Image: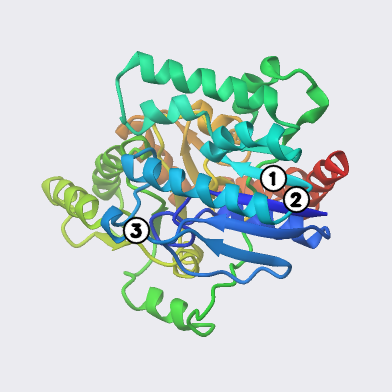
């Protein structure tokens, strides 16, 4: 089989690395599908056996593409649509695997070229408009709702990545057997062209870390991630544990400065380390040094990709008790807390001091990951999708 995979992302940059697209493509290729992967011009090339990476031209005047909806992405998606048309005119594909908004133009091309269409739905796009504070226009949100519903009905198969999204999608599908819930739950090292030698990233990551115990957050610094809540909580933690340090991995330079100022205003000078954006390998090294891992998210319904790696880490996790987390997490596998500074602080302190419970939840977390989210489980779901398409 031959497939065209569309990834409307800055492919492998610190601010826009689509791990979910990479792993989906990697496993599909391992199952014997010959793949052309079309993506933005920005980013570092990746090495995936059986995959030809194709980039649209990088448009210097668009600058770096931010996370979430933006005018820049709209312009680049128009260019992707033209490149997609060119590829379809030159080569016959058995199916097109469209991630996120690329499904909108693929839906129009499907009857012209007769390919099967996979809609890889990593989020509800109308919801993204609100989460990223892109617009308050009800008309625009309604337009995206209509486009999303039309794409769901036109797709040969639909992939969702968490139970909440699966429940929202199911009533809109004509054939329930075409729906696959495939969590973004695997996290192997990524093969980047020209990457640093093994150990280099780890050496850089270890140099600047304070002494343990280390409370570590990795991810974006967008408003829904709850970084302000976390900093307020850690100020309370320091009142009880003067030896604890907070490491925050991620964020744009402007976001880092914003939250560094907040940390200083809370009296946390010298106790918070901000790394800024780092490579995936470096982020993984920093995570391995953690005493406690964090997911302080306050908004959203999709399960964060990092949750699966945190489950498998063997390190206790403190996470907010919101639907985004509780689709996967419960009190048996992590320290769930209400999304308030007081509750987050209490959860961190318990994870630091109650070693018996910390050991118990990490043991159960690993068992949960192995039974429901590990690579063999992921491969079995992808194999079912390929069987449907073939």
Residue 312, position as x, y percentages in the image:
63, 54
SS under mark 3: loop
In this rendered view, identify the residue nearer to me: 247 or 254.
Answer: 254
Residue lying at the far bottom in this picture: please name it: 197
Residue nearest the viewer, comparing 181 with 312: 181
Please name the residue that numbered disc 3 is placed on.
Answer: 59
**Residue picked out by circle 1:** 96
Give the quarter of the image for residue 136.
top left
Considering the image in quadrants, where does the N terminus appear?
bottom right
Tell me: 139 left or right of 118: left
Viewer-closest of 71 and 30: 71
Residue 339 location (% of width, % of height): 38, 30
Task: Work out how far the residue at label 2 is from the one at label 1, CA to CA, in angstroms.
Answer: 7 Å
Q: Nearer the N terminus, badge 3 or badge 1?
A: 3
Spatial separation of the CA atoms under disc 3 and disc 2: 28 Å
Q: Which residue carries the number 2 mark?
A: 93
């Amino acid at each position: 089989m031959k497939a065209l995979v569309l990834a409307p992302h800055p492919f492998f940059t610190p601010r826009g690395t689509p791990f979910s697209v990479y792993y989906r493509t990697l496993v599909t290729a391992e199952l014997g599908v010959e793949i052309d992967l079309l993506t933005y011009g920005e980013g570092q090339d990746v090495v995936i056996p059986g995959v030809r990476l194709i980039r649209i031209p990088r448009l210097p005047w668009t600058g770096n593409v931010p996370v979430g909806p933006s005018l820049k992405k709209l312009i680049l998606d128009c260019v992707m649509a033209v490149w997609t048309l060119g590829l379809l005119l030159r080569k016959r594909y058995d199916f097109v695997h469209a991630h996120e908004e690329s499904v909108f133009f693929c839906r129009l091309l499907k009857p012209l070229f007769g390919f099967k269409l996979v809609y890889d739905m990593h989020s509800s796009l109308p919801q993204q408009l609100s989460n990223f504070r892109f617009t308050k226009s009800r008309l625009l949100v309604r337009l995206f709702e209509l486009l999303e519903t039309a794409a769901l009905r036109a797709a040969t198969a639909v992939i969702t990545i968490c139970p909440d999204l699966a429940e929202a999608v199911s009533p809109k599908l004509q054939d329930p057997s075409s729906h696959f819930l495939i969590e973004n739950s695997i996290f192997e090292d990524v093969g980047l062209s020209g990457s640093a030698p093994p150990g280099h990233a780890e050496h850089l990551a270890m140099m600047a870390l304070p002494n343990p115990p280390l409370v570590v957050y990795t991810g974006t610094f967008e408003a829904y991630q709850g970084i302000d809540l976390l900093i307020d909580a850690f100020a309370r933690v320091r009142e009880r544990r003067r030896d604890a340090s907070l490491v925050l991995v991620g964020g744009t330079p402007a976001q880092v400065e914003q939250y560094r100022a907040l940390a200083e205003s809370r009296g946390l000078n010298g106790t918070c380390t901000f790394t800024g954006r780092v490579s995936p390998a470096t982020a993984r090294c920093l995570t391995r040094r953690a005493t406690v891992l964090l997911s302080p998210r306050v908004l959203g319904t999709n399960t964060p990709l990092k949750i699966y790696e945190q489950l498998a880490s063997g390190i206790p996790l403190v996470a907010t008790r919101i639907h985004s987390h509780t689709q996967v997490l419960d009190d048996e596998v992590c320290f769930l807390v209400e999304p308030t500074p007081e509750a987050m602080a209490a959860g961190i302190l318990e994870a630091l001091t109650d070693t018996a419970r910390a050991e118990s939840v990490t043991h159960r977390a690993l068992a949960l990951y192995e039974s429901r989210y590990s690579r063999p489980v992921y491969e079995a779901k992808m194999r079912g999708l390929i069987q449907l398409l073939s």
